[in-house]
Image (cartoon, rainbow, N blue to C red):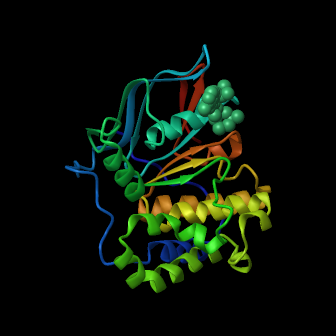
Amino acid sequence: MRTPQPIPRDASQQARDAWATATSAPVTTEPASPPQQPNRSEKASRLGCVALEKSYRKGDLVIPVLRGVDLEVTSGEFLSVSGQSGSGKSTLLHVLGLLDAPNVGEVHCDGRRIDNLTEPKRDELRNQNFGFIFQSYHLLPELTLLENVVAPLAIRFSTLRWWSQRKAIHERASEIIEKVGLGHRIKHRPSELSGGEMQRAAIARALIGQPRVLLADEPTGNLDSATGQEIMALLASLNEVQQLTIIMVTHDERIACQAHRIVRLAEGRVETVNQAA
Ligand SMILES: Nc1ncnc2c1ncn2[C@@H]1O[C@H](COP(=O)(O)OP(=O)(O)OP(=O)(O)O)[C@@H](O)[C@H]1O
Ligand SMILES: [Mg+2]
């Protein structure tokens, strides 16, 4: 197993430390429950898939998307997934994150199969371990930015726990929102945000639950290059300081090469796997 190399980045160390502090501040004394019977060995693969096949059906038309993907992402790795539009990048992220089921093949986390768990178990594992940054954000239109960001914890916690920790959760959410540069938009609804602001809101929401694995679909896709680079510095800091495993889809080669490793999808398969520079 290779050891992930440090990522070159140009944001100041101070900014990275501040971000890492904000995103690691405990909301609760109870850590997220790990998947059942996790293999804690450092050599364990955090997340992977074997012979993954996924197709969509539209009436009589079958659209094969993933045609046998094998992938292993080690704990603490920062992996970038690239490939042409329609090559199946988002589909792969959704299947790895248990948002969608494969037709054939298996998804593993910490050495155990997870795609065949019952739906409640999958939901629990996803909520407690994975953070998603969706390509099209999926912010809830009727909620404010702050309410959107805290939503994963509202789902995770019991009503009692939610109300007893509400203040700490809101404080932490406010810090993360500040760090993604949206402190002045905290009470705004998604319809009142720009595309780049919605993207940053989606990043804040993905981080509130202190995920073990971040699945990021074009996290810089709607940002100008300076803001995109700031977001990359934040992701790199989370990866480096907190050992957050990151699987990031991007079209942008300059963004992709900031990961430890680049996987390219073509015609539903992993075509090449490059070590980033
Ligand atoms: N729910 C669906 N029903 C039918 N076809 C779908 C569905 N979702 C995706 N597809 C098709 O599957 C293929 C792969 O889609 P996917 O979104 O994974 O591609 P992608 O690599 O993420 O593309 P992009 O870079 O444009 O985001 C596309 O041809 C798309 O049209
Ligand atoms: Mg996509």
Residue 178 shown left or right of residue 4 in the figure: right
Residue 191 shown left or right of residue 38 in the figure: right
Residue 79 shown left or right of residue 267 in the figure: left
Give the percent coordinates (x, y) of residue 200.
Answer: 67, 63
Q: Quadrant of the N terminus?
A: top left
Give the percent coordinates (x, y) of residue 64.
Answer: 56, 18
Q: Residue at x 28, y 52 (%)?
A: 35
User: Is residue 30 shown above or below 216?
Assistant: below
Q: Quadrant of the C terminus?
A: top right
Residue 47 shown left or right of residue 175 in the figure: left
Quadrant observed for ligand 2 in the rendered image:
top right
Q: Is residue 31 visible?
A: yes
Q: Quadrant of residue 223?
A: bottom right
Q: Is residue 209 visible?
A: no
- Nearer the observer, 43 or 65: 65
Q: Residue at x 72, y 49 (%)?
A: 221
Give the percent coordinates (x, y) of residue 76.
Answer: 41, 52
Q: Quadrant of residue 106?
A: top left
Q: Residue at x 44, y 29 (%)?
A: 102
Give the percent coordinates (x, y) of residue 121.
Answer: 31, 48
Residue that protrudes farthest toward the top in the picture: 60
